[in-house]
Image (cartoon, rainbow, N blue to C red):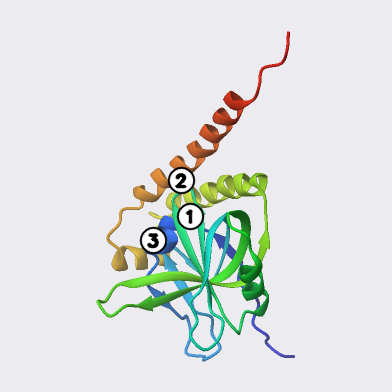
Amino acid sequence: MSQAPTREVAKRVFAREFNDATFTFKESDDERAPNFALLPTGDRANRVFVVGTLTETEDIGDESEYWRGRVVGPTGTFFVYAGQYQPDATAFLRDAEAPEYVAVVGKPSTFETDDGTVNVSLRPESISASDENARERWIVETAERTLDRIEAFEDETNEYAEMARDEYDTAVETYRREAEAALDSIVEDGDAAEESEPEAAP
């Protein structure tokens, strides 16, 4: 019976934490072993699920298409890159009419610049059109997952939290504030929408 690798669950992460997840690792020497990004709140992520606003797309390829998309959420921006190995995602970014809501499932990817800065981006497995309701549900669920990770951060058996303490300087409380601010943004958007609705005629 073949030991086919199972797909990792796609983690929900806000942009601020995702962009801070600059340390990557494997858990075995097998060349097919999955590559993980270490989340600063003490978890590993091989795949990530994001819903946000696609605000810009650009073909930055030289000899062949290589598309970059900016997906904006309540705590920052995810950069999505798709080329010949992601034909469906490439086609979506090529045809997209920004701004529009999108849902993205992809793998974290890191790139070190000449000055030593590590940039984190998303290599999409899929991109699809989404809507405001899905975005709000994603914010609520992502905030819950973020707070769950923070609650488990001090658990002595949490090996990923121990790794995060070694690798990162940012306090996990930063991500608690980000999650709370993201939830507040939904409330504020809802209040603004109510204020803009015309009053019913008497």
Q: Secondary structure at mark 2?
A: helix
The amino acid at mark 3 is Pro
The residue identified by callout 2 is 179
In the displayed structure, 11 sits above or below 4; it is: above
Q: Secondary structure at mark 3?
A: loop
Distance from disc 3 to disc 2, alpha carbons, whole Å, reads 14 Å
Question: Can residue 69 be seen from the camera position used here?
Answer: yes
Residue 19 % position (x, y): 41, 63
Residue 23 % position (x, y): 37, 72
- Say few, some or many: other residues with alpha carbon within 10 Å of mark 1 (under 14 / 14 to 19 / 20 or more): many
Who's the residue at 31% across and 53% down the image? 171
**Quarter of the image where one finds residue 90:** bottom right
Distance from disc 3 to disc 1, alpha carbons, whole Å, reads 11 Å
The residue identified by callout 3 is 40
Who's the residue at 66% across and 21% down the image? 198
The amino acid at mark 1 is Phe
Question: Can residue 46 be seen from the camera position used here?
Answer: no
Q: Which mark is residue 14?
A: 1
> Which quadrant of the rendered structure holds the C terminus?
top right
Q: Earlier in the sequence, mark 3 or mark 2?
A: 3
Residue at the far left in the pictured view: 115
The residue mark sitting in front, 3 or 1, is: 1
Q: Are marks 1 and 2 in contact (CB under 8 Å)?
A: yes
Who's the residue at 67% across and 54% down the image? 130
In the displayed structure, 187 sits above or below 168; it is: above
